[in-house]
Every structure is written in C-alpha cells, then in structure tokens.
Image (spheres, rainbow, N blue to C red):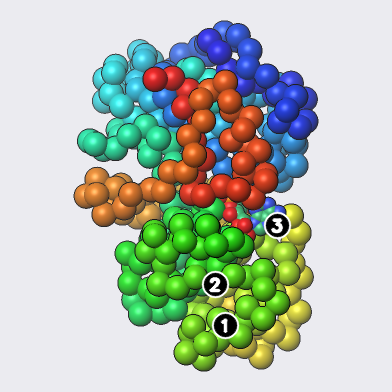
Amino acid sequence: MKAVVVDSYTDIDRVVLKDVPIGDLAPGSVRVRVRAVGIGFVDGLKVQGLYQTKDPLPFIPGTEFAGEIDAVGDDVTGHAIGTPVMGMARSGALAEYIVVPAGAVQPLPAGVSAEVGASFRANYLTAHYALTERAKLRAGEQMLVLGAAGGVGTAAIQLGRILGARVIAAASTAEKRRFAMDLGADAAIDYTRPDWRDELKTLTGGHGCDVIVDPVGGPVSLDAFRSIAWNGRHLVVGFAAGSIPALPFNLPLLKGGVLMGVDLAQVPRREPDAYQRVTTDLFRLLSEGRLEPAVGRVFAFAEFREAFKMLAGREALGKVVVRVSA
Ligand SMILES: NC(=O)c1ccc[n+]([C@@H]2O[C@H](COP(=O)([O-])OP(=O)(O)OC[C@H]3O[C@@H](n4cnc5c(N)ncnc54)[C@H](OP(=O)(O)O)[C@@H]3O)[C@@H](O)[C@H]2O)c1
C-alpha cells in the first residue's frame, strides 16, 4: 500500500509517499480502507519530533480518519465488512489501509461524508470536553475563542453556540473573522491589534469573558486572561503560536479567574465516564444534523505536504483534510 512514511524527524518537505506492507490483522483489530484523514497542528509537530511525545521511527503520521471496514479479526464481532466508519489512532492514518483495535472505530452516521468524519474527533471532543466537563459553560455566558478559525477554534464556536453561550471569535485576518462569523460567532475581533482588549471590553458590555478557549498561547493568552470575568475560566488547550505564556500569579487573585488545563489524550484513562458522556453527546449532535464540522481545504493524497504547510503557515480555515482515496 501507499503510505506517508517519516524515517527521521524532519521538515515535511523531506517526507515521501512510499510502498509499505499492509499491517497484520492482530486479534481484536479491524483493517480500514482509508478514504480521508484530518490533519491537525499536532500532526506537523509530530513529523518534526517537536511534540511532547515522540512516535518511534519510522512511523506513518495521521491520527483521525474515515473509510470503510476492509477486514475484521477472527475474534471481532459487530463490524461488518464495507461499513463506513471513522476513527482515531495514535498514528498511521496517512496510508491506504490502517489496522486499529476494533474499539477505535465507530460507524459513520448516515449522510456524513468521509471528510467530515475525519474532521470530527480530536477538535470536537477537545472543545466539548473543555466547555462542558472543565469550564461547565452555562447558557448566556460570554465566551472568547482565540484562533477562532482554526480546527479547535471552529469546534469551540459551534459547540459554544449549541450550548447557548454568546461567542466572540478572535482571529488574525478579516477572512478568518468572516469564516468564524459564518460558523455562528456572535462577534469577531482582531486580536493582533494592540488595543484589542478595549474592544473586547466593549463587546462584553464591560463584563469580561466568562470562558476563554485558548489553543494559541503566547502573549495573547495573557491579554485574554487580563480580560477574564470574575469566576471566569481560561481553558489552556494548546500553543499554536509557539510559546508558552507565564501567568503572573497575582492575576488570578485580582481577576477572580481560573486557569484550567485541557488534555484530551489523558481523558479516556483519567475520566472514562466524562469521555463517554462527551463522545455520546457529540455523536448524537452529528447524527441529528445539529453539528456540521467545518471542513476546510481538502488535498489529494499526493499533495499531503500542502496540508501540513497550510497549518504551519497559519492559513487553515477549519479542519484541513487529505483525501487518500476516492
Ligand atoms: N489539549 C488538547 O487536548 C488539544 C487537542 C487538539 C489540539 N490541541 C492543540 O491546539 C492547538 C491548535 O490546534 P489546531 O489543530 O486548532 O490548529 P490550527 O487549525 O492551525 O489553529 C491554530 C490557530 O492558532 C493561531 N496561531 C497564532 N499563531 C500561530 C502560528 N505561529 N502558527 C500557526 N497558528 C497560529 C491561528 O489563528 P490566527 O491566525 O487567527 O491567530 C490558527 O488558526 C495546537 O497547539 C494543538 O496542539 C490540543
């Protein structure tokens, strides 16, 4: 099969498509014919060996995928060959086939495309868990989303609206702010302007932000925390800007706000009930058509490098997808 293979941690330009053997169908596993793969900011970090955990070399990148069941292990029940599914793995998705534990895939709800299925898990689970289980977002609260046109940002906008919040989208370009508004944000703000906190204050009617979704990091995180409402919750999701801000401890004291970490990777193990609640609710929203994940550019398999470059270049709108096969 054809697969994207990372032989050494390196720049994406040096990574190539190769012919590799299809993985063995281990007990308890299923093989999926991959149709589409969602690419996130993290995938680019993993290729370069810059992520907090390193995949042993060589490895096939790509975590979120959709396709259909191609083969099932002898001991696996409940997975029929040909069933459209979506799933998530630690790596291995940017390939024509992936072998995963049977529990790592779920049927794709009727009418949901492979591109949407591959865009769904990481960002929407993260945003839903962050908003409901961590921040306990309440209807009517004011929510600020940093990096609002990105993968996590778009998920947070859509889920924030569904949960009844007033959503303010912060993004760096007019095109991104328009994209965020089209997804349902109530207001948009240019957080690259030095005086953006003044505008934010006006937009919240002087109240400040009850919940801040922060996948960006860097100096804007500190600006945002300074604009938090009393009893506000600042959700630390990621550091796409490339630097980890250091929060002076007097700020939580003065502002009465709380800094909350969000790490989806640990949730299934540490909070299995919460993970189940969030997953069940997301699949319900998707199946009922109440949630339509924001798919951005879709690249052909041979153009996989462009998908990574789009994320690294701060150009992505919604989730970037690689179409592996027709
Ligand atoms: N904690 C978790 O469980 C979890 C789960 C998923 C993702 N994450 C993390 O969340 C972060 C965002 O992931 P994503 O997939 O949403 O990424 P994304 O689609 O690329 O969005 C990130 C946004 O960050 C902003 N940004 C600011 N400076 C940037 C820079 N130098 N380069 C790139 N973007 C920059 C961009 O918005 P503007 O141009 O508008 O500033 C961009 O839209 C990553 O750090 C990722 O590791 C964490």
In front: mark 2 or mark 3?
2
The disc, 1 or 2, on the residue closer to the chain's N-terminal end is 2
The amino acid marked with disc number 1 is Glu
The residue under the point 63% across, 17% down is 17
Residues at marks 2 and 3, CA–CA distance in whole angstroms:
17 Å
The amino acid marked with disc number 3 is Ala
| 187 or 97: nearer the viewer | 187
The residue under the point 55% across, 62% down is 174
Q: Is residue 219 visible?
A: yes
Residue at the disc numbered 3:
241
Number of marks in the rendered image? 3
The kind of secondary structure element at disc 3 is loop
The residue under the point 49% across, 17% down is 96
Q: Compared with residue 308, is residue 25 higher up or lower down, i.e. above or below? A: above
Crowding near pointer 3: few (<14 within 10 Å), some, many (20+)?
some
Residue at the disc numbered 2:
189
Q: Compared with residue 17, is residue 207 higher up or lower down, i.e. above or below? A: below
Residue 190 falls in image quadrant: bottom right
Q: Residue 231: percent from the left, percent from the top?
A: 52, 84
Contact (Cβ within 8 Å) of mark 1 with mark 2: yes
The kind of secondary structure element at disc 1 is helix
Residue at the disc numbered 1:
199
Residues at marks 1 and 3, CA–CA distance in whole angstroms:
22 Å
